[in-house]
Image (cartoon, grey):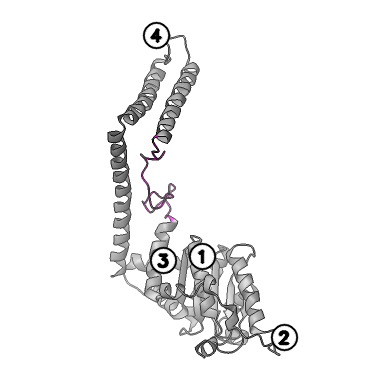
Amino acid sequence: MNKKRFISNIKNEYTRNHLLAIDKARLRKEKYYDLYPKLQELDEEISSLTLKCARLLVKGKSLDHENDDRLNKKDLIESFKKDHLNAVEKKKKFLLDKKIPLNYKEPLYKCSDCEDTGYIEDGTMCHCYKQKLTTYLYDMSNIHKNMLEENFENFNIKVFSKEVNEKYGLSPRDNMKRIYNNVKAMCDGIIETNGIIFSGSTGQGKTYLCNCIAKYMIEKNQVVLYQTSINLVERIRDYKMSMAKDMDIGRSNYYQIFDADVLIIDDLGTELNNSFVNSELFNIINERMIAKKLTVISTNLSDEQLKNTYSDRISSRLMYNYDHFLFFGDDLRIAINN
């Protein structure tokens, strides 16, 4: 399925869900009216009171004394409130006695925030709509399959060695406990961070922890964009180098890099680097820092290699503004397979 058709299908799905919820509410109301004619009478009584009050407000008359013009609007409103409250309480008692849901007439939307329209009251895109778009990007990168297994719930600290590393003065397991606890606290907002960078050689668990973060933040209704550095550069090029064709889609994909609540860049340093990439990468890192949006980066490059690979502006942001976590130890893939 191409991107344009996918977005169109999402919009159609929202329209169907919204109308379906309304239609089900209507059928539910009619069912209860057929079962309990008294319920319809109670609803009509409440509606009649409201309509009567509106008419009398125009005429300046009260509910109890329709011909007495001397009663002011305040008296009218107070009288209406009393009668309306009595009618509502009578209906509520009836619903409870018959074990009818109090919200029997209300549409039951899948998302109460946007009422299955995709947009909230101020016109901005709802979190559920954003996540549907992001989910498509996950499907493209096959991250959903990984997240079924690679998440905080399945995190196994025992795969890390207990043997103390002489160079760092602690074991890979103790180091991983420290990283795990800090990262989890950052995801929960307990510890503030401008960004997170995982560094270390291949097979140390960096990508695994990135997947843990992705799943955890999605479950907190955060919009997460997970991209390898190669895919990220391709996404940028698709927009920057594209002509008119699919321009709207390219623009949406590009600005999602900045708008996502969480951006995860896996394997930084594997992309083809040049001045264009350096400029775009700095813009992403800098803009997201200013907007206080979480960015997580994993890389096999050492601090020295990062400085030699990227511009001073990028390396200084990563070294001095990000929380840096170093992974070390044996290749976990070999240990797990053995």
Disc nearer the start of the sequence (3/2)? 3
Disc 2 to disc 1, how far (Cα)?
Answer: 32 Å
Mark on residue 134? 3
Describe residue 162's horizontal placement relative to residue 33 as left or right.
Answer: right
Disc nearer the start of the sequence (1/3)? 3
Q: Secondary structure at mark 3?
A: helix
User: Is residue 117 part of the magenta span, yes or no?
Assistant: yes
Disc nearer the start of the sequence (3/4)? 4
Crowding at label 2, few (<14), some or many (≥20) Cα neighbours within 10 Å?
few
Q: Horizontal and vertical percent for residue 102?
A: 41, 38
User: Is residue 192 part of the magenta span, yes or no?
Assistant: no
Task: Residue under label 4, please give it.
Answer: 67
Magenta region: 98-126
Crowding at label 3, few (<14), some or many (≥20) Cα neighbours within 10 Å?
many
Disc 3 to disc 2, how far (Cα)?
Answer: 41 Å
Task: Residue under label 2, please give it.
Answer: 169
Task: Report whether residue 5 is seen.
Answer: yes
Q: Secondary structure at mark 2?
A: loop
Disc 4 to disc 1, how far (Cα)?
Answer: 64 Å
Disc nearer the start of the sequence (2/1)? 2
Residue at 57%, 64% in the rendered image: 290
Describe residue 75's horizontal placement relative to residue 66 as left or right.
Answer: right
Q: Amino acid at mark 1?
A: Met
Q: Nearer the viewer, residue 295 or 96?
A: 96
Q: Amino acid at mark 4?
A: Asn
Task: Report whether residue 322 is seen.
Answer: no
Q: Is residue 114 above or below residue 65?
A: below
Q: Nearer the viewer, residue 222 or 276?
A: 222
Crowding at label 1, few (<14), some or many (≥20) Cα neighbours within 10 Å?
some
Q: Is residue 128 above or below residue 274?
A: above
